[in-house]
Image: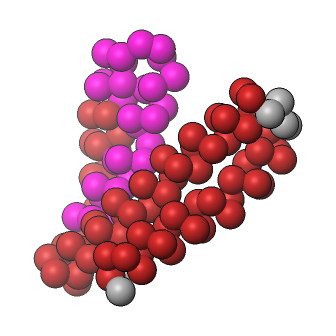
Amino acid sequence: MIEEYLLRFLIGGIAVSAFAAVGEIFRPRSFAGLFGAAPSIAIATLLITIWNEGRPYAALETRSMILGAAALCAYSVIVFRLLKHRHLTALLSSLSALAAWFVVALGLDWLIFG
């Protein structure tokens, strides 16, 4: 158990550093956070999943991460449009867009996995 946490810490730290370096290249600087967090955690999790569960299970998890990313993209676009064009508050916009996130995530899951 402790070995898994140490491995996750090591892989995650290396990946965060690598993605943060990539994020420094792009403008605006706010992209550094985007490149630093989610991809590095996903990579660390997938490597540990491959180690513990094998490649077929990790492939299923990877497909699920891709569907989640597509749903997050839809959520982000909707929040942006609600904030910019409807002038709603951040709380109301984000709560309203959660329904869209669920629809996209579950709809893609249904379309792809049946």
**Toward which corner of the image does residue 5 lie, by quadrant?**
bottom left
Of the 4 image quadrants, the one containing the C terminus is bottom left
**Toward which corner of the image does residue 32 lie, by quadrant?**
top left
Query: Is residue 2 a member of the stretch shown in magenta?
Result: no
Residue found farthest to the bottom = 114
Q: Nearer the viewer, residue 57 or 81?
A: 81
Is residue 38 visible in the rendered structure shown here? yes
Give the vertical position of 43 relative to 110 (above or below).
above
Identify the residue shown where x is 16% and y is 81%: 56
Q: Nearer the viewer, residue 51 or 63?
A: 63
Residue 25 image point, x, y percent: 31, 15
In the picture, measured across the screen, residue 2 lies left or right of residue 49, that is right
The magenta region covers 20-47
Give the vertical position of 7 relative to 56 (above or below).
above
Q: Nearer the viewer, residue 109 or 19?
A: 109
Residue 15 image point, x, y percent: 29, 43
Identify the residue shown where x is 36% and y is 24%: 23
Of the 4 image quadrants, the one containing the N terminus is bottom left
Give the vertical position of 58 relative to 92 (above or below).
below
Identify the residue shown where x is 48% and y is 32%: 33
Asked which colour scheme the image uses, the reply is: secondary structure
In the picture, measured across the screen, residue 51 lies left or right of residue 69, that is left
Q: Most prominent secondary structure in the magenta stretch?
A: helix
Residue 2 image point, x, y percent: 37, 73
Identify the residue shown where x is 63% and y is 44%: 78
Is residue 4 visible in the rendered structure shown here? no
